[in-house]
Structure formats: structure tokens, C-alpha cells
Image (cartoon, helix red, strand yellow):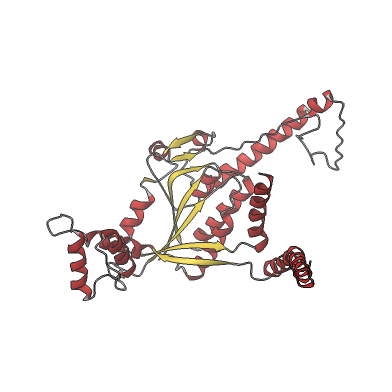
Amino acid sequence: MSPLQEYALFFAKSVTIVAVVLIPIMAVSLSKRRDQGDSSGRLRVRRLDDVFRAREAAIRAQLKEDGGLLSAAEVEKKEKDKTGTGPPQARGRLAEWTRSQLTRFRPKPGDGHKGARRIYVLNFRGDIRARAVEALREEITAMLAVARPGEDEAVLRLESPGGVVPAYGLAASQLARVRDAGVHLTVCVDRVAASGGYLMAAVADRILAAPFALVGSIGVVGALPNFHRWLKKHDIDFEQHTAGTYKRTLTLFGENTEEDRQKFRDDLEAIHGQFKGFIHHYRPQLDLERTATGEFWLGERALELGLVDQIQTSDDYLMKRRHEAILLELHFHRRERWSQRWLPLMERLATWIRA
């Protein structure tokens, strides 16, 4: 091997070592710096009434006076007559013209509105841990900074089957902030608001539900597997030491007594009692003896029981209100930390290596 080839091989090895060792170290260092830096999020505001009106205009633009549909050539000519230039990169395709029309359509300020009232639209799609509460609290904080008590309204499109008690208790408390501030709160349930989801909905001044939405499930459940007999069968000892009579009741690996089970049931009853008390505070007209049984009902039956106030979808409600108020949809998106972005990539890489 010539000296030049040896040097080239040495250089290639050096570059490989730098790439394998230094680049990961630099990436970790950079991720830590970014994690310690700006970890906040971004609040996005969208004019829903603009969106509705733009879609309406886009459809109307395709129609003839007699209700028929314009051809692609007629659409292009109509656009040229309006602007003098025609749609950008017009190719005679109806779909392309529709997209450009949606982009260009801007209603005049105040056009179609009877007043300056604002409706803030929030969305909550809950899982068992109610992770969406982090975005909800930021959206509500921003809204309350500008909302006018007694004039503006908040509309929450809610979907949740319930979950962990503290998380949904916090979510309901965030909605209570809206009512305490004097802003009218409407909750729309299109699919499901059960258990913790209904705990949130009950805070509203008014609850709307779709005809087949699932509503209710005012109850508490607790479940825990126990492996004590399996451990005993395999001669495995398990030790647990506590200070305080009820520091632990039911356990995964210890032997559960009837006293432990009764304490666990008492705790569930206490939580259920607070659940009912919270709902009674906001909906005193509700017959809790009939409805706080853990059952759920479809929208129309829920209306008969007083769980909701009206049968209506969120789409219908907002479409009707768009002529009398400005609809502002709020969405808070928290920036993911670099470490959170790297983890899924590393997991996929590990899967690829194993394959």
C-alpha cells in the first residue's frame, strides 16, 4: 500500500471516529441546552367564521344562477372577469380553482355580524390521563386575558370517556375559571362525555349533545390485580413496610385482607360523594339519585334526565352563531423538547437493527 493510500485510510478512520463519538455528544449537549431554554408553546388563533364563509363562497362560485354546476372553462372565465388575470397557474381544473378561491376569500371586517361579540372555541379530546389539560389551561388563561365578562362566550367541543380522577378534576377546575370570570360557557358533546368527561361538562352554563352522544357515567371504579398466591406457590417472599395505618390498602404482591378491601371501597365512595357534590353545585336541578349510578345514556335520553340542555351538534351551533359573533378558535401547541423528539427516532432505529 502506498503512503498516499495509507494516509487516506487513516483519514477515513479518523472521520469515522469523530462521527461516531463526537456527533452524538454534541447532539446530547444541544438537546440539553434547548430543553433548558424555551420550552413554551405557541397559541394559534383561527377565525372560524372566515373559514365557514370562505367555504360557502367557494361553493357558490361554482354554481350557475339556475343551480347548475359551472364547467371548468366557465369557472376560469368567471375568475378572469372578476380579477382580470384569472387564477394563478390556471389549468382548467375545478379543484385547483376552489383551493385558490378559499385562500383569497377574505370577508370584509364586520360583514355579516350584528355586533362585536366574540365566541372563543376550544377543543378537548381527553384520554385516560387527560393530557389535553395542559393545552386547555394555556388556552383558557390566554382567553380570560382578553374576554369581556357578560359579552363574550366560550364554547368547548368536548370528547372524553373519562379517566384518572386528579387529572379530570384539574380539567373541570380550569373550566370553572371561565364561569368564575363571568364568561358564558357552552359545552358541546358530539360523541362522548362520560365519567370525568361529564365532570367537565357539568361546569358549563349550557350543555349541548348530539342525539347519539354518550353522556353520564357518574361513578368511580378501581381495579388492581394481586399476585400474592402466585408468589406463595413459587416460594417467593414479598415484604412491604409502612408507617401509617392506611398508607397502603390493596397491594399488587401482598396479602390483601378484608379490612384493606373495605378501606379501598370507602375511598371510592368518598370520591364518588365529592363527584356528586361537584355536579350538584353546577347542576342543582339534576336528580343524582337517578343519574349518579355509573350508567350512561344517549343524548335524547340524557336530555330527558336533565344531564344536557339541548340536542344539537357543535357544527350546527357554531354555524348558526357565525352571523352574530366573531368565532375565534384557539389551539395551544407546546413545543416538544429535543429529547422527546430523539426518543421515537431511537426506538425506530432499535427496531430496524433488531429486524
Q: Position of residue 70 (x, y in %)?
A: 18, 58
Q: Nearer the viewer, residue 189 or 14?
A: 14
- Please tell me which residue is depicted at 27% across the width and 70% down the height of the picture: 87
Residue at 54 percent across and 34 percent down: it is 294
Left or right, 301 with respect to 220, comes to left
Residue, far left:
66
Answer above or below: position of 349 versus 18. Answer: above
Farthest front residue?
Answer: 2
Quadrant (top left, top right, bottom left, bottom right) of the C terminus: top right
Left-right relation of 103 to 352: left
Q: Quadrant of the N terminus?
A: bottom right
Q: Is residue 256 visible?
A: no
Determine whether, in the image, residue 351 is placed left or right of residue 314.
Answer: right
Q: Nearer the viewer, residue 93 or 190?
A: 93
Is residue 139 placed above or below 132 in the rendered structure? below
Task: Residue 323: name its quadrant.
Answer: bottom left
| Residue occupying image coordinates x 76% and y 27% | 258
Write the residue at 82% across / 28% down.
Answer: 231
Q: Quadrant location of residue 224?
A: top right
Please provide percent x and percent y for residue 144: 51, 66
Left or right of residue 15, residue 52 in this image: left
Q: Is residue 248 visible?
A: yes
Q: How many marks?
A: 0
- At which x and y percent is residue 234? 84, 25
Q: In the image as oriented, which residue stretches furthest toward the top? A: 233
